[in-house]
Image (tube, helix red, strand yellow):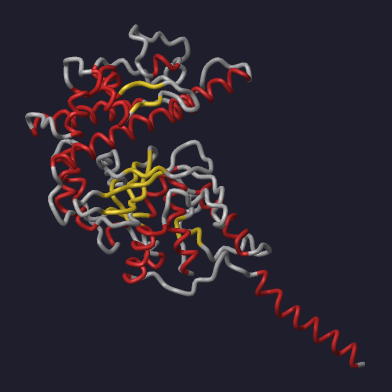
């Protein structure tokens, strides 16, 4: 009888234990977001959010496949996980419902496996478009590490540092979705807010307790950046100048600014190579399947008209900045690089070598096929770049000077 009683007692214990396993959240919420936790989040991003976050085999996030929006959401999600804070974002498919760490979909898995499944699920259910609903615009003098920049449907960045000179440095992932090192750039995002619905720009995640509230009801909400951008006619350099003045503990030196703009230009130009490579790879793929041309959706995914327009605006803005500085200082390395990029006269060979050591534009990935920043500027000025993803590589970068005659539909 004692053995039978012991057996039933064991069953009772198991029955009591099973519900707690079956109702396991992705992770328990033991803390609550508030101003103090936001400050800890800022410091964590500054010190712990590294470019190898998804490539470190010792971390549970190793080989997490991501694009730009996935990395932005993951930054907030991972801190919430490590700090046992709630993570809540809107459900794209069901209005009024949320996606949160309280979900019990993966309750039969160990916690790290639950976490990875949850990260993948959040990545599948979110995008740069959903970011506009899960975040809200903030004042420019309130930008901190952990905040983001989003251009819905285009790109998004993580703000990872604000320097003494007031520069909001960024990291970002890109397309296609894959495990990768994040790209860190000691410069502002390459965009100016221009969405008439104010869904883009510098933004902050809503705290879970405020997730259902509209953007205007969020603490620190501000429309300042949209009015300023419009007043400045969306000039990137003028806009970022004002941000640096608002955030900086000291004035940015002319050489620092020239260096920042040239570095941002180099990064932006090389970022284009990823999009060109993706288009060429995808074109090769569909041609292997018997199709010569991309359909409308594929064309939209791989064409670069907006990116190419912004590249031209970027060159023009830097040119205006250099005109404002005036005479080139021969002792300034950034100024000499800038002169090599923008001067009408052919620079001396040594100056071109120095510029090319600083920045070359890799026209496609995996190949030693480069263009100088000066040549890219000349091609952009000549409107020679082709954004059509069906175009051959030399046309995409304006290497071929004759007009591209499309044999595939243009959407």
**Residue toward you, 230 or 376:** 376
**Residue 346 horizontal side relative to residue 60, left or right:** left
Residue 177 at x, y percent in the picture = 51, 40
Q: Identify the residue at horizontal 28%, vertical 39% (top origin).
A: 191
Q: In the image as oriented, which residue stretches furthest toward the right?
A: 1
**Residue 155 horizontal side relative to residue 188, left or right:** right
- Is 33 located above or below residue 60 in the figure? below
Res 306 seen here? no
Q: Identify the residue at horizontal 33%, vertical 9% (top origin).
A: 401
**Residue toward you, 298 or 356:** 356
Q: Identify the residue at horizontal 17%, vertical 46% (top origin).
A: 227
**Residue 155 horizontal side relative to residue 82, left or right:** left
- Is 320 located above or below residue 86 in the figure? above
Count of marks overlaid on the render: 0
Quadrant for residue 68, please give it: top left
Res 290 seen here? yes
- Is 183 located above or below residue 331 in the figure? below
Q: Quadrant of the C terminus?
A: top left
Residue 264 at x, y percent in the picture = 28, 37
**Residue toward you, 51 or 312:** 51
Quadrant for residue 400, please give it: top left
- Is 213 located above or below residue 73 in the figure? below
Residue 152 at x, y percent in the picture = 37, 42
Residue 228 at x, y percent in the picture = 16, 45
Q: Quadrant of the N terminus?
A: bottom right
Q: In the image as oriented, which residue stretches furthest toward the bottom?
A: 2
């Amino acid at each position: 009888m004692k053995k039978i009683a012991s057996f039933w007692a064991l069953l009772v214990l198991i029955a009591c234990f099973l519900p707690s396993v079956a109702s396991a959240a992705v992770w328990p919420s033991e803390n609550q977001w508030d101003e103090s936790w936001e400050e800890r989040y800022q410091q964590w991003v500054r010190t712990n959010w590294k470019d190898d976050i998804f490539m470190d085999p010792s971390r549970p996030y190793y080989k997490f496949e991501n694009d730009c929006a996935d990395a932005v959401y993951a930054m907030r999600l991972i801190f919430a996980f490590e700090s046992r804070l709630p993570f809540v974002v809107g459900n794209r498919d069901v209005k009024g419902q949320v996606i949160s760490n309280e979900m019990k979909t993966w309750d039969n898995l160990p916690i790290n496996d639950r976490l990875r499944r949850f990260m993948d699920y959040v990545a599948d259910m979110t995008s740069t478009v959903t970011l506009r609903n899960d975040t809200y615009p903030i004042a420019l003098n309130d930008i901190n590490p952990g905040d983001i920049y989003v251009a819905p449907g285009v790109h998004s960045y993580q703000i990872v540092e604000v320097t003494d000179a007031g520069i909001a440095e960024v990291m970002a992932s890109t397309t296609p979705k894959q495990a990768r090192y994040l790209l860190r750039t000691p410069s502002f995002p390459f965009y100016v807010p221009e969405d008439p619905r104010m869904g883009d720009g510098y933004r902050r995640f809503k705290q879970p307790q405020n997730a259902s509230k509209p953007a205007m009801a969020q603490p620190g909400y501000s429309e300042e950046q949209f009015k300023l951008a419009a007043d400045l006619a969306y000039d990137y350099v003028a806009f970022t100048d004002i941000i640096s003045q608002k955030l900086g503990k000291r004035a940015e030196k002319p050489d620092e600014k020239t260096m920042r703009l040239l570095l941002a230009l180099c990064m932006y130009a090389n970022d284009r190579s990823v999009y060109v490579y993706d288009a060429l790879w995808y074109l090769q793929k569909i041609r292997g399947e018997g199709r010569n041309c991309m359909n409308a959706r594929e064309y939209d995914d791989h064409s670069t008209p907006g990116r190419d327009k912004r590249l031209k605006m970027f060159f023009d803005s830097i040119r205006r900045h250099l005109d404002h500085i005036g005479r080139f200082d021969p002792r300034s390395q950034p100024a000499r690089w800038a002169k090599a990029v923008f001067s009408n006269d052919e620079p001396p060979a040594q100056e071109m070598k120095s510029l090319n050591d600083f920045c070359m534009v890799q026209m496609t990935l995996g190949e030693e096929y480069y263009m100088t920043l000066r040549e890219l500027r000349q091609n952009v000025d000549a409107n020679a770049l082709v954004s059509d993803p069906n175009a051959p590589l030399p046309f995409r970068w304006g290497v071929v000077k004759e007009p591209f005659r499309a044999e595939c539909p243009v959407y």
